[in-house]
Image (cartoon, rainbow, N blue to C red):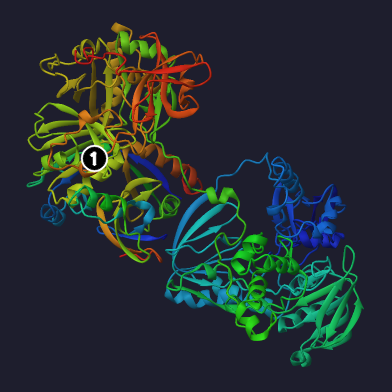
Amino acid sequence: MAELRIEEPSVVAVLASSEVCERLEASGNGTLLRVAPREILIVGGADPTVEGATLAEDVSDAWSSLVLEGPDAPDAFARLSELELPAEGWVQGDVAHAAAKVIVEPGRITILVPAMLAAHVEERIRTDAAEVLAR
Amino acid sequence: MGAFEFEGRSVSFEPGDTLAAALYRHGVRTFSRSLKYHRRRGLYCGTGDCPNCLMTVDGQPAVRTCTTASEDGMRVERSGGWPSAERDLLRVTDSLHRVMPVGFYYKTFIKPRFAWPLAERVIRRATGLGALPDTTAATRKVVRHEHVETLVIGGGIAGLAAAERAAADGSVLVCDEGRLGRGIAPGASLDRVRTLVDAVGGLDAVTVLEEHTALGIYEGLHVPVAADRELVHVHPARIVVATGATESHGIFPGNDLPGVMLGRAAAGLAGVHAVRPGERAVVVAHTDEGLEHLRTLLEAGVRVVAAALPEALADRLPGGDIGEVVLDGDVHEARGGGSLRSVVLRRGDRAKRFDCDLLVLSLGLSPRDGLARMVLPSEPVTVVGDAAAAAEPGPCDRDGVVCLCEDVSTHDLAQAWEEGFRNAEILKRYTTTTMGPCQGAMCGAALSCFAASRSPQVLEEHGTPRTTARPPAPRTTARPPARPTTLETLAAGVHEIVDKRTSLHEVHVEAGARLDRSGGWLRPFAYGDWREEYRAVRERVSPMDVGTLGKFTIAGPDANELVERLFPCRTADLGRGRTRYVLVLDEAGYVMDDGLLARVGDDEWYLTTTSGGAGRTDARLRQFADRLELDAHVLDRTAQWGAINVAGPHARDLIAGLTDDPIDADALPYPGFADVSVAGVPCRAIRTGFVGELAFELHHPRRRGPDLWASILDAGRAWDALPHGLDALELLRLEKGHVYLGQDTMPDDTPAKLGMSWAVDMSKPWFVGKRALERMQALPVSRRLVGLEFAGGPDRVAELRGEPLVLGDAVVGRITSAERSPTLGASIGLGWVRAADGAFPDRFETVPGATASVVPTPFYDADGGRMRG
Amino acid sequence: MSVAIPCGWCGPRPFTEFAFGGEWREVDALDADADFERVYLPDNAEGVQREQWFHAMGCRTWTTVERDTRTNEAS
């Protein structure tokens, strides 16, 4: 069985040089996703001031979280995406035709999608993973 | 125990019966009629490879009854044949074989011209595998992905053994299109399968998917595996193909008579279903497996009047009552009217006839190598077991039915050869051999053998076609799907309609808006009568949800340079708080997108683009920042911010009541923007002119959208405000002469063709597409987008959209937008026009009774006074 | 997975996650005629060719890839 929860995450976007991004990666408060050589998303309460960054800003409005919890979470995810998930960590790619960031923790898979696609991805999960989702 | 319905009769079945077995037990011998010539066809392969047993089950055509389990209440009927498969009047076409030879439909009914469509309808009605159900809705198949180390296709002896071995290297997935061990008569083979099934069942690393058919091996590797309820996309690191082999299809006169059967079919009936396949049998066994089948038949009490086998296997002949044993004998001919009556066996130049009703053939193996042949040599795919064996087709020079599915005989191939189709690939296409449900499983080797035997090389060596002692003939290209597949399966998870939604979606739904797809988003087209909404914009004030717009912040030390190089107009002179309309050109100088560029800071910009073009423009910004090595960043705010356009003569009045920030013409002029707080929501208010009225586009944090919208509508009650949607917008922007990219523009429209040369500054040293525009400046402009006014024509002026513009008897243009304007009291539109003799015409005819003339645009607010207010 | 494109940041990914940017070409040409060739006359090799791919569904960066058009092997 797996449970689905929709959340409004807290996300900070940092656009900076490779060097600044590397330094930021080394520190770490919140979940830090270096989504591109010069772009970082920090998920979960972070202070949006970063020295030397071109831009560091709260972009929480841009993202929605779909959280799958339970032993069948990987099974539910396999119905949405070709992405092969690590046992722990994160990947980004096509999830139900949304450009998503996927964070994997023990017993939980968090799918971060652009807010305008949240409704579509939620519907996909509820339809295609119906048999493994708890009521 | 149970019963199903067969053409009005009730047929009972034993547990474990396939539909074919139950029907055979019931006495059915004609299972189908052949595709073209309506010849009777009986059970033949018994393993789901040939087309003979295909019937319509529960409305679904082309079901393989020899591998489908019987279920209580099923409705089964044969397809083909008129009025029925049993009494088929269309069998007359068989006698007309001479005048309807292979490919006849390419050559006949060409003149008179009306003859072909008529003939084609008749031909289509007379052939086919059944009618598609029109009352069954397609079910939605679940699609899921599996990542495994090894995929084994085929759960027979070789496949299960390979799975057992591969388990040591990681996860293994075994798929089989049937149930493991099904259809195998008791004996050594079945025992071996059962042992392996137990062994594999105990291994954690191995998963078995029964009744899952691999559709093809695609590059990558990627194997879609289809089942009744789901489509599994398997992504393996390695593949083992263990699809086995069918018994070879024998080619001789009479080879498709009901009563002629491959060994497995006969043994399956007798050994698995306890149904005697015939009373008097002739058995031809060239293989060990053939001898096993002979034993099964003898044990089932079938009277074997003759057995032909090679001398080398003579000592393994099973004991039992066998009439005559013919060593090194072959089938010369099978004879009968609608079913088998006798068989002539031949040895050397001696022949003997045997009366019988069953001919059992085990002539050799024909590997099921379709999947294996789809693979590139460099890919990690191995083939094991019988699927890897060399094909052992029988002689291919005897006359007989070669392709059972498509009703192609050897003499058809010979005739095609005479007509000049002289290699296997072309023979295949002309005669359609191998193009039926079996996809060459039964006939592929024979086709290649035929072509190879007549190749110039062979003829040169021997003078006549040779069909023995030849190198294996190359097979025709194998392509997915390996088995016939329903559209339902192919459509599973594909071309999914993905609708983006703004944060105001629920608000629109609640307001009763008509929502529809536009540019990848689900948007409100109208809330009620769109003409009322249009009037609200022109006369009072009205908000619209434009949150779908692409929105980007461009920032960084080199942001100014990126912007100056990407857009064709000058940007360096744009001051803070000011905006400029920009075109986005591609490298060929064509207009890809348009938008509004705003200067936010010394090196910070804000760009809005069309809803549909946002992704492409973002990609372009990043590409040129990369290639030009510019230190600039792009932040996509399309999701982060919503936008509401408040438009109309009272737009400023409405917003002024919701803000303390100055928004008068001095503080917020046109063109320009300001960051203000409206109804407590932080907004970037941008002056826009898209609809030709005073308008403020309020870009705001997405989650505050519903509050802002509600505040605006609330304040708007003072002016009887109504929200407007895309229907109203169509006319509003048309009156202002604004183009809709993709509707009014073509992929090769340059700024000049759109009358937008004013948006291009050719004195700039360089911008994307400049060289292309330079090159095209030397050429005359061949096509132009113009404003039109219509006279006459349909009541619904919008119907003119897409109609041609005609001069004399030539089409010189097309109408791309059209609508009746109540404000102007005229029917207006846009369209493109081709130059004729160097000049652009300005009067045209269009649909009967209507004319169009070119008029200048904008039609409304031509001096821009209203929008600049 | 299906045909894989090696994204410079994310590693090999199904090609469906990408937008294809055509053959790699210079950003500009010396004159209008050379520019015509640059834009309209790609080499279209039967063999290895240099291409630009955009990882639209992932990191949204551009990668230059060498792909064999006969086998789809890409690096």
- Label 1 sits on residue: B773
Q: Nearer the viewer, residue B341 or B434?
A: B434
Q: Looking at the figure, which quarter contains the N terminus of chain B?
A: bottom right
Q: Residue at 24% x, 13% y: name it.
A: B651
Left or right: residue A19 compared with residue B3:
left
> Where is residue B841 shown, x and y percent of the image?
38, 23
> Where is residue C64 shown, x and y percent of the image?
26, 58
Quick check: B531 above or below B53?
A: above
Q: Nearer the viewer, residue B431 or C67?
A: B431
Q: Looking at the figure, which quarter contains the C terminus of chain B?
A: top left
Of helix, strand and loop, which one carries label 1?
helix
Rendered image quadrant of residue B103 = bottom right
Q: Chain of mark 1?
A: B
Quick check: C6 above or below B249?
A: above
> Where is residue B145 shown, x and y percent of the image?
45, 56
Q: Nearer the viewer, residue B24 or B41?
A: B41
Quick check: A62 above or below B846?
A: below
Q: Residue at 30% x, 9% y: name it.
A: B540
Quick check: B203 above or below A102?
A: below
Left or right: residue B149 compared with residue B120:
left
Q: Residue furthest front?
A: B837
- The three-letter code of the residue at mark 1 reads Leu
How many discs appear? 1
Callout 1 crowding tier (Cα within 10 Å): few <14, some 14–19, many ≥20: many
Regarding residue B235, the answer to whether it shows in the image is yes
Q: Residue furthest right?
A: B355
Rendered image quadrant of residue B744 = top left
Regarding residue B526, the answer to whether it shows in the image is no
> Where is residue B365 shown, x and y percent of the image?
67, 77
Left or right: residue B275 compared with residue B681:
right
